[in-house]
Image (cartoon, rainbow, N blue to C red):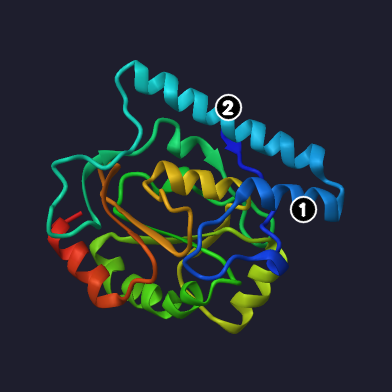
Amino acid sequence: MPRRLSEHPLPTEHAPEPGHPLHPQRGLSRRAALFGTAGLAAAGAGAWWGWQRHAATEAAAGASPTSPRSTSSANDPNVAAGDPLPAGFWDVHFDTPEGTPFNWAGLQGKPLLLNFWATWCPPCVKEMPELDRFRREFSAAGWQVVGLAIDGPTPVKEFLTKVKVGFGVALAGFGGTELAQTLGNTAGGLPFTVLIDAQGRIRHRKMGATHFDELAAWARAMGPA
């Protein structure tokens, strides 16, 4: 059964400055104090760490979670060496901002641009049109684009009424920060973008805002889907 990550967002009034690391545990305590949802948030976090333990078990059996390899390009720190996705990556569950299930597992088998963002993150907001341009120009080549919001449904829905994008958006909530870490986001900040090939290997990752020309160059270097 797919595992649902906690959907509690980081509170916007305590959002870190752009580029600064996120502090998910502190954010969770604030939410618990503000909204009285400590039990529910802890349950979601527990489900996530259960998934993490499962990934560690799989790694010990031969499937290794993502980590930068020494064979990555010395000239471009954003290039990954085809690191495999963490075990159980496709088993988690996300909702859309409208509360319906997001078809996460259906993304398998095609190249994917995965972007972690939030409405309170100015660089994230600025790069949205760049991501949407990439979707328009590379969808014919099989590329998919998904934005995982480290945010709550209300601000995301309000944002999407003002900034129209054609790619899918899902709510990652609190658990999204840990998911980003397993994909190589060691700094824990936003935005964070990962390019995954059709075979489920991480080919590029970047902390900080990106743009169409950079994404297009990476996608072309990866070759046909």
Q: Secondary structure at mark 1?
A: helix
Q: Is residue 213 above or below residue 109?
A: below
Could you say which disc has been placed on residue 31 in the image?
1
Residue 64, by quadrant, is top left
Q: At which x and y percent is residue 160? A: 59, 75
The residue positioned 63% from the left and 32% from the top of the image is 47
Q: At which x and y percent is residue 101? A: 61, 49
- Foreground mark, 1 or 2, reads 1
Taking the image as drawn, is residue 182 in sight?
yes
Amino acid at the residue labelled 1: Arg
Specify whether 154 is left or right of 185: right
Q: Secondary structure at mark 2?
A: helix
Judge by depth and name the residue closer to the eye, 180 or 155.
180
Could you say which disc has been placed on residue 50 in the image?
2
**CA neighbours of label 1 inside 10 A, class few (<14), some (14 to 19), many (20+):** some
Residue 159, by quadrant, is bottom right
Q: Is residue 20 above or below residue 37?
A: below
The residue positioned 42% from the left and 41% from the top of the image is 182
Judge by depth and name the residue closer to the eye, 143 or 16.
16
Amino acid at the residue labelled 2: Gly
The residue positioned 61% from the left and 49% from the top of the image is 24
